[in-house]
Image (cartoon, rainbow, N blue to C red):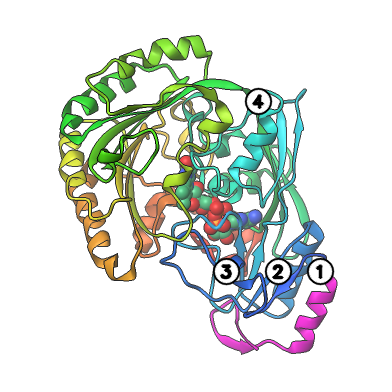
């Protein structure tokens, strides 16, 4: 059968080599047409349709080592699928051996040391579910089906970022299978250079098999949820957002969203599909403090829906899930911001009014706090001046709507990028981003990353990612 070499040439993969691989693995191996292949190769963004030659659904570290050794012996392109949520579809590559990590979803919590060890195939919800048993949580993202590996390796932010920094700032160690098929540990006192590179440098250095996260007391109950108003109220609501966000303590994270109303049960039916503005809030501190902090939001104007209440933290972590299903077509443009300026608000309102699909949105995430207090070089994520994230997200169903939606996203971004810090989030970059923008996203640490790459993956075996060339 046909495969791609690491350098991207087409080559023949011998049947007996494949048979040998199948025999050595504990997890299943899927060829095109075999049950499981389609499910593995498909990713969250339906714009991506890549066809791996073979999928190995690894059942443990030994399977990962076997696959890396196989790819090496056969000079075969390798790709790694965590949660498959990367918008650029980096988990899948044509002609590759895809390592699907979805059977490796164990989580072990040490409640005394406040550390969770999670296997690299975990989704965010897996970790939240297990850590909440102990009243603890790690710093993870907003949508529970996102993979921990891709999110953490690129930085990661969510409702706890304001208190404790990027997700990757809260990693205490990782286990990794290297290009020469060895299992190594990366932490502040073992392979510290690798540890630095992994906390923002993506999957450039090997296959991560496990991640250890620092945990903090959070929940089980928090005050969180969303309040929505008609889009006509957007100027006033964004002004409220701007002023509240500036003085909010780190326990409170505020997100502003402008979009057509989703068909959610908490919104009146006659509002579904009509333009709204919503504020999403999560107060991860004491619920009684949270209630006071969100009172100005709940009492503001005449909302059309309000589900900003006391709720379990794990539920808060999946509140946005229904708006982000796998299988739609997605295109995003994103920038870091240092403040919310009135002029940016005007532009956001203007472009939200021109949204082309019922699923698209202009979103402002608040991330200011702990991450700003660490030095730029603390990890390759950098961007220690970022206080908000602007994400212009379009989502639609049909291929013939691609052009209109992409055009809307790009126009809005062209008009708003002047408010940027100059930095952008590597995990939000779409497939068509230029090399220059990828370099911008990888930031000031790019040279140092290239050095780590040269030491740990000089042959650039791990290249189906935001690739750093070895120097
Ligand atoms: C609906 C949605 C919500 C999101 N919300 C947030 C959010 O709240 N906060 C945030 O920070 N980001 C968020 N993101 C962005 C997210 O961080 C990235 O999409 C990330 O790449 C997803 O990780 P994954 O494992 O699911 O991705 P995948 O597509 O599986 O992989 C992404 C990259 O990581 C590499 N990789 C995966 N697993 C491994 C491994 N074990 N070892 C080495 N490399 C590996 C892959 O090869 C690929 O290059 C969101 C994305 C989506 C689609």
> For residue 25, which numbered disc appears in the image?
1
Dot 4 alpha-carbon crowd within 10 angstroms: few under 14, some 14 to 19, many 20 or more: many
- The disc placed on residue 99 is none
Distance of label 3 from label 2 (alpha carbons): 11 Å
| Residue 160 vertical position relative to residue 411 in the rendered view, above or below | above
* Helix, strand or loop at mark 1: loop
Task: Tell me if I can see residue 451 in this picture.
Answer: no
Label located before the other in sequence (2 or 4): 2
Q: Which residues are magenta?
A: 1-25
User: In the picture provided, is 399 more to the left or to the right than 327?
Assistant: left
Could you say whether the residue bearing mark 3 is in a helix, strand or loop? Answer: helix
Foreground residue among 263 and 2: 263
* Residue that badge 2 annotates: 56
Q: Are marks 3 and 1 in contact (CB under 8 Å)?
A: no
For the residue pair 298 and 59, the one nearer the viewer reads as: 298
Q: Residue sitting at 60 percent across and 33 percent down?
A: 170
As measured in the structure, the alpha-carbon distance from the residue carrying label 2 to the one carrying label 4 is 33 Å
Ranked by sequence position, the earlier of labels 1 and 4 is 1
The front one of 439 and 150 is: 150
């Amino acid at each position: 059968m046909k495969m791609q070499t690491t350098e991207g040439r087409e080559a023949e993969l011998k049947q007996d080599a494949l048979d040998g691989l199948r025999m050595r693995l504990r997890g299943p191996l899927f060829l095109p047409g075999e049950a499981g292949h389609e499910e593995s190769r498909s990713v969250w963004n339906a714009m991506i349709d890549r066809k791996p030659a073979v999928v190995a659904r690894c059942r443990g570290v030994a399977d990962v080592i076997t696959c890396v050794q196989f790819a090496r012996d056969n000079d075969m392109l390798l790709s790694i699928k965590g949660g498959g949520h990367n918008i650029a579809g980096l988990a899948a590559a044509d002609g590759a051996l895809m390592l699907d990590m979805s059977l490796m979803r164990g989580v072990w919590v040490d409640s005394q040391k406040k550390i969770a060890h999670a296997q690299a195939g975990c989704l965010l919800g897996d970790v939240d579910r297990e850590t909440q048993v102990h009243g603890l949580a790690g710093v993870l993202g907003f949508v529970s089906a996102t993979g921990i590996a891709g999110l953490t390796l690129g930085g990661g932010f969510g409702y706890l970022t304001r208190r404790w920094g990027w997700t990757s700032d809260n990693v205490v160690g990782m286990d990794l299978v290297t290009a020469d098929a060895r299992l190594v540990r990366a932490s502040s006192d073992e392979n510290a250079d690798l540890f630095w590179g992994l906390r923002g440098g993506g999957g450039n250095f090997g296959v991560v098999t496990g991640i250890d996260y620092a945990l903090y007391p959070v929940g089980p109950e928090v005050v969180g949820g969303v309040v929505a108003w008609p889009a006509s109220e957007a100027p006033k609501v964004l002004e409220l957002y701007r002023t509240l966000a500036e003085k909010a303590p780190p326990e409170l994270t505020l997100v502003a969203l402008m979009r057509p109303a989703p068909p959610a049960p908490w919104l009146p039916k006659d509002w579904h599909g009509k333009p709204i503005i919503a504020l999403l809030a999560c107060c991860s501190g004491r619920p009684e403090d949270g209630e006071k902090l969100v009172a100005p939001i709940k009492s503001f104007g005449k909302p059309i829906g309000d589900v900003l209440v006391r709720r379990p933290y794990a539920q808060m972590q999946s509140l946005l899930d229904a708006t982000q299903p796998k299988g739609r077509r997605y295109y995003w443009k994103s920038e870091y911001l240092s403040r919310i300026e009135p002029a940016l608000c005007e532009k956001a309102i203007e472009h939200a009014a021109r949204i082309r699909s019922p699923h698209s949105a202009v979103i402002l995430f608040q991330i200011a706090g702990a991450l700003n207090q660490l030095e730029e070089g603390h990890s390759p994520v950098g961007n220690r001046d970022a206080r908000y994230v602007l994400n212009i997200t379009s989502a639609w169903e049909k291929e013939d709507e691609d052009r209109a939606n992409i055009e809307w996203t790009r126009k809005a971004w062209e008009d708003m990028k002047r408010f940027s810090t100059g930095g952008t989030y590597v995990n939000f970059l779409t497939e068509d981003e230029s090399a220059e923008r990828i370099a911008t996203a990888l930031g000031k640490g790019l040279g140092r990353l290239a050095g780590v790459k040269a030491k740990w993956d000089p042959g650039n075996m791990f290249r189906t990612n935001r690739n750093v060339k070895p120097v």
